[in-house]
């Protein structure tokens, strides 16, 4: 980087850090006096991205809460790749880094870390159809990884045991790009953290884990070591509070709780139906969702779980149509012909909207939608029974994370005998909602990916894109 460019970069970032008094003040006090918490992160599924409802991502949710806890505004610096995250932290012109950073011995030399908030392992990824290697000695192809990453640190350690081990670094790509290249057979292998692979496998279902290259490793927030530890200690206290209150588990469930059972055949069939069947009905989903204040992708995901977008679908119990409405429900909704896709979709949207509205106002998204979907499947009364049992068992009846532990109990006499509406197939309702969550994620990913992209105005330095405040 040229000296003028470096000066411009430092000037821009230091301007964001400015406004503090010149007297002695610790790092936490500086952040609070400035009124802004400046954080470097990555634009990725596991960290931060712009979703259909605005900014989202695990790191974003945690950071937003931390900023509110400190009483300051959150301001994000988006690094183009993990290597740039570390470079920006080294410059010391941000307060902290929150980008799915693994705690490693090499990094601890020059960074402070908060207490961990998640644990991952590093995995070697290959594509089905090629030979699965069982260990590094069996690699027979091109391995490309993120440059200056924890993955590279781990490979360097393995190299002493496997001297034939070779790899290439990509200083520009993100993990999702490398996974896509393996999926498209442009590469033979890459390495991904287990959380990133779990989120992305649904979109690239032929990818598989060959083997783990590391033991479980903690993810944490990072702070420049040359600063005092006051902000780090505040972060530790905040994360400890989240863990103790159960809020951290709720946030993790929101992003990963529905991904435990990967169904290759089901996902592959869904991807095919997106191209073969969805185009005929997408506009109907969009219109119906807009009329009843729903996300059309959630409505479409529900319809797929019900009928695989088959307007003539019929079950042994007599429910039928693309939204699989019973005769009684269809009558209440004003649906005359259940096999008419327009009538059925509009009726299903109205029904789901009514279920969401019946829930107590204090229940927020996304739990509100998940509870409404459970009611769509087993009926509002049984869903309320599950909420009552959840509360009796010491859980939060407004939380999908807690409700999903109770739903399977509705088929056990010990439990359903205590309820108003009795026996229900709660385990099926649980799987019903989790399937819809996965279908919805895929539809969101595809629709956001296919949006026209507006070229951003170049920032002062090509390694940075400094967002306007996101809170």
Image: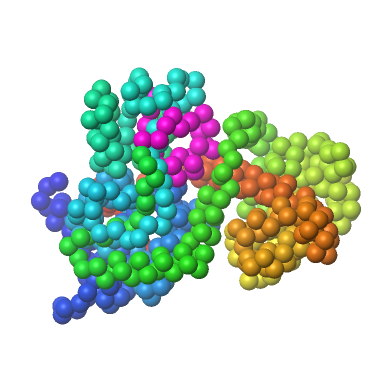
| Residue under the point 29% across and 66% down | 232
Residue 339 shows in this picture: no
Q: Position of residue 217 (x, y in %)?
A: 36, 47
Residue 441: horizontal and vertical position, in percent? 56, 46
**Range of the magenta residues?**
188-213
Residue 393, located in which quarter of the rendered image? Answer: bottom right
Residue farthest along the left direction in this orientation: 3
For this view, does 273 lie left or right of residue 225?
Answer: right
Q: How many marks?
A: 0
Q: Nearer the viewer, residue 373 or 156?
A: 156
Percent x, y of residue 252? 50, 55
Q: Is residue 72 left or right of residue 18?
A: right
Q: Residue 420 at x, y = what percent?
A: 83, 65
Which residue is painted at 32% across and 61% down in the image? 114
Q: From the viewer's perspective, is 334 left or right of 404?
A: right
Above or below: residue 223 compared with residue 457: below
Residue at (27%, 63%) from the top-left corner? Answer: 95
Vertical comparison of 422 with 462: above or below: below
- Colour mapping: rainbow
């Amino acid at each position: 980087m040229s000296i003028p460019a470096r000066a411009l970069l430092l000037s821009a970032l230091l301007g964001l850090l400015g406004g503090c008094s010149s007297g002695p003040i610790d790092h936490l006090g500086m952040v609070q006096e400035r009124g802004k918490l400046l954080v470097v992160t990555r634009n990725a599924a596991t960290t931060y991205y712009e979703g259909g409802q605005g900014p989202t991502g695990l790191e974003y949710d945690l950071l937003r809460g931390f900023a509110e806890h400190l009483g300051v505004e959150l301001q994000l610096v988006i690094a183009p790749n993990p290597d740039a995250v570390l470079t920006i932290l080294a410059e010391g012109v941000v307060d902290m880094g929150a980008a799915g950073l693994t705690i490693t011995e090499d990094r601890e030399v020059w960074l402070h870390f908060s207490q961990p908030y998640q644990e991952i392992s590093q995995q070697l990824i290959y594509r089905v159809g090629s030979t699965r290697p069982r260990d590094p000695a069996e690699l027979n192809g091109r391995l490309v990884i993120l440059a200056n990453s924890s993955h590279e640190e781990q490979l360097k350690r393995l190299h002493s045991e496997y001297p034939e081990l070779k790899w290439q670094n990509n200083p520009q790509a993100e993990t999702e790009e490398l996974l896509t290249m393996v999926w498209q057979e442009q590469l033979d292998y890459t390495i991904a953290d287990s959380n990133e692979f779990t989120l992305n496998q649904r979109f690239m279902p032929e990818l598989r884990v060959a083997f783990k290259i590391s033991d479980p490793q903690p993810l944490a927030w990072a702070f420049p070591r040359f600063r005092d530890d006051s902000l780090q200690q505040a972060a530790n206290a905040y994360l400890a509070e989240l863990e103790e209150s159960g809020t951290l588990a709720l946030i993790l469930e929101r992003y990963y709780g529905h991904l435990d059972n990967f169904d290759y055949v089901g996902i592959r069939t869904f991807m095919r139906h997106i191209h073969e069947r969805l185009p005929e009905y997408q506009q109907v989903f969009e219109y119906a969702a807009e009329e009843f204040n729903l996300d059309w992708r959630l409505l479409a995901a529900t319809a797929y779980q019900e009928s695989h977008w088959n307007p003539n679908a019929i079950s042994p119990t007599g429910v039928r149509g693309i939204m699989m409405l019973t005769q009684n429900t269809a009558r209440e909704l004003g649906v005359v012909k259940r096999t008419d896709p327009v009538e059925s979709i509009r009726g299903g949207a109205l029904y789901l909207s009514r279920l969401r509205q019946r829930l107590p106002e204090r229940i927020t998204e996304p739990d509100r939608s998940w509870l409404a979907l459970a009611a769509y499947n087993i009926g509002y009364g049984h869903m309320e029974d599950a909420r009552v049992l959840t509360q009796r068992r010491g859980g939060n009846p407004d939380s999908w994370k807690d409700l999903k532990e109770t739903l399977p109990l509705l088929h056990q006499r010990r439990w359903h005998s205590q309820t108003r509406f009795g026996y229900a197939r709660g385990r099926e309702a649980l799987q019903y909602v989790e399937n819809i969550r996965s279908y919805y994620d895929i539809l969101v990913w595809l629709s956001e990916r296919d949006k026209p992209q507006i070229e951003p105005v170049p920032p002062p330095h090509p390694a940075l894109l400094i967002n306007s405040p996101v809170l």
